[in-house]
Amino acid sequence: MVDGDTLAIDGARVRLFGIDAPERGQPCRDGGDCGAQSQDFLEALIGGRQVTCAPEDIDRYGRVVATCFAGGADLNRAMVRAGHALPYIEFSRRYEADAPANPRFAAPWSYRRTATGPPRQVSPRAQSAVQNLAETRERDCAIKGNISSGGVRIYHTPGGRSYAATRIDEGRGERWFCTTAEAEAAGWRAVRR
């Protein structure tokens, strides 16, 4: 167990897809270490059972990002439902309906940005992802408008095959849309696949 959203399996780190658990040392709103509690809960949830994972992606650190199961239970979903992780909607809305109304901790992505201590080196892509997430939450617009390497403007809707892997870089002219009509009016087309 690495933390509340990362497992160590056969020497490799596997990041749980679609969720973000509090960082180690991240305080709960009512006191305590929510990061440690999250890690302890995940360990208890697994309970020594065999874990199987269905890979979904590879992250920028080279980790497999997967949906993992123990005893038939979706660990990713169980962490969100129990309030020990939040849906990471920048990458997937799969667990959004499972989120508690009042989380016990600040959003981990916000905490990482504001945590005290030495500044972390954050890549421009990660900074863009955090900004995209904030804008998406504010506007509740989940359609991703990206520009292909050939310059074609394509939009991706939640649940689509390449939605989770699509990253928006507003510096390149990519953007978010609230409706497919808005995307099409702006000159974007639906992904073909």
Image: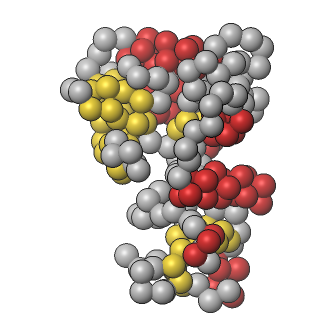
Residue 7 falls in image quadrant: top left
Q: Is residue 136 above or below residue 110?
A: below
Residue 96 visible in the snapshot? yes
Q: Which residue is at 54% across, 74% downward?
A: 146
On screen, residue 22 versus residue 61, left or right, reads right
Q: Is residue 64 above or below residue 183?
A: above
Q: Which residue is at 42% across, 80% downward?
A: 149
On screen, residue 30 versus residue 176, left or right, reads right
On screen, residue 158 versus residue 62, left or right, reads right
Q: Position of residue 26 (x, y in %)?
A: 64, 22
Q: Which residue is at 68% across, 30% downward?
A: 115
Position of the C terminus by quadrant = bottom left
Q: Which residue is at 27% across, 32% downward?
A: 12
Residue 163 visible in the snapshot? no
Q: Is residue 165 above or below residue 10?
A: below
Give the total number of marks visible in the rendering.
0
Q: How is the image coloured?
A: secondary structure
Residue 48 falls in image quadrant: top left
Q: Position of residue 54 (x, y in %)?
A: 30, 42
Compare residues 130 and 48 and report the one nearer the observer: 130
Compare residues 175 and 97 and report the one nearer the observer: 175
Position of the N terminus by quadrant = top left
Q: Position of residue 180 (x, y in %)?
A: 64, 76
